[in-house]
Amino acid sequence: MSQPNAVSQTIVPTWVDASVVTGMLRGIERETLRMQPDGYLSQQPHPVALGSALTHPHITTDYSEALLEFITPPQPNIADTLRYLSDIHHVANQHLPEGEKLWPMSMPCMLDQDEEQIPLAEYGSSNIGRFKTLYRKGLGVRYGRRMQTIAGVHYNISFPDQLFERLQQHEPNPEHKALSLQDYRSHRYFGLIRNFIRLTPMVMYLLGASPAVCKTFLIGREHKLQPLVGGTLHLPYATALRMGRHGYQNSAQKQLGIHYNNLQGYLQGLQAAVKTPYPAFSQLGLDDEQGEPIQINDHILQIENEYYSLVRPKQVPQGSETPSEALAKRGVAYIELRAVDVNPYSPIGIETNSAGFLESLALYCLLQDSPEISVAEQELIEKNQAEVVERGRAENATIQTLTASYAIADWLQLHLDAMRPVAAVLDQIESTTIYVDALSVMQQRIDDPKTTLSAQVIDDLLQAGGTWRLGSQLAEMHTQAYQQHHLSNDTQDYFQDLVGASLQQQQQLEQTSQPTFKEYLANFR
């Protein structure tokens, strides 16, 4: 096996300093299940005291009524982002139904044998509200409801225009140099995306925290997981089962061939998937025996958001735009990193070190060369991801590239070393050591796999006696942290005002919904 060569420290050009990355923004979306005192998924509706899940900007639901999603607005630094996320957790905890707690892990708490007991998210009687619920019903019909109870952390990052302007000034390719700023920005973001896909095993190894699952998650599914303790299944060297074959599954999407080599090709692939019928979904039918719709359509994707990906190019939609229409008109505004497990040891699901590592990685991916991903390389990428998901902490785990094969520790070290100058630049922005410190923590996890989150989870599951016991212990600790978190009067008033405003906004939508939902759906179909 060939050994990695030292990567040149010239990933960061001499002209890159704090001034060109000042103005970076980041935001976090964190998902978490509501758990009953007995460890099972909550059957209670979304608390009215939290406002409308349809229109509230910070507190909504994902697949299920019991799957909360907390969303921060873009923030100027990591500290403000995590503080905002803590505020949201504090507010949500105040209004949970009696005895309920927020489940601290990516893989779900105990699920009933009947998956119909996983309640779909409800958004009221407006057309858009009913459409959102129908989309979730379709996901359940297509893939089963259990899969949809998995939670994650999505990390959103945007870089300032001055960085793209400077990159374009130093651009050696005349064709790229001639692009408009919008198109050049999209071109570079797609380069970032390709490199992030190549380096996703790094995220899975260093931040993966789902090496085990409760056996109720796999009822009715074939699997090769092994018993660990107390109804918990695992793989001994797994890191992030959430990201592998035991997590999000979508066989239909394998054939899509959606690539990230450029924005136009990506959008074409996405549009084709939204418009192309898929035989297995056609067989399910569009409506049940009573004539009630069970999925939006029988296409490979009901809507664009059904496309599961490790990372997404994003643009804020305006009015009734779809995500791809927004991207086509205004290009990529930010990227969404979606391969991040919930950190069960953090009350808010993510720590400063993880955020610092992800931002360093994103800038590293942006500054590096990023050739197009060939079919051969895509196959290697998928093999690498499966290897790290299922046995990343094994001594003989390897990473394959088009030119070499690496021991996983050597491959991780190669890239972590190359990221250090990037972290140093990011620390210059506000004279911090957040980013360099984050890489030091990741260095420890490379040096000693026992210090990874996934290894820690396995140890603690054994000590606690199973998934439910450990999850309950951590949930109780986190509840105390939410209760001790201080909210300023202004912030408390802000969130209180949002409750009334969001409920009023939903009510207005329900009063003005025209035409009937049947006509609305027929128009969409």
Image: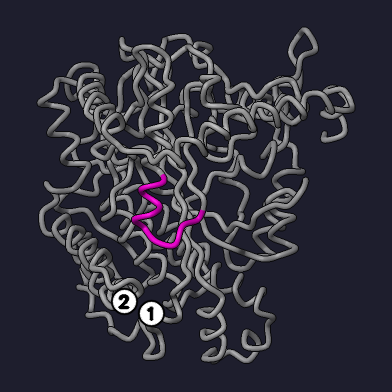
Tell me which numbered mark, 1 or 2, is placed earlier along the sequence.
Answer: 1
The C terminus lies in quadrant: top right
Contact between labelled residues 2 and 1, with CB atoms less than 8 Å apart: yes
Q: Is residue 390 left or right of residue 383?
A: left
Could you say which quadrant of the image residue 522 lies in? top right
Identify the residue at image location x=43%, y=40%. 30
**Can you give x and y, in whole percent of width and height, for residue 287 in the image?**
76, 18
Query: Which residue is the site of mark 1?
Result: 18
Q: Which residues are magenta?
A: 74-84
**Disc number at residue 517?**
none
From the viewer's side, name the closer residue of 330 and 418. Answer: 330
From the viewer's side, name the closer residue of 232 and 209. Answer: 209
**Disc number at residue 428?**
2
**Coloring scheme used:** one colour
How many numbered discs sit on the rendered protein? Answer: 2
Which three-letter amino acid code belongs to the residue tagged 2? Gln
Q: CA distance from mark 1 to mark 2?
A: 5 Å
Identify the residue at image location x=73%, y=24%. 507
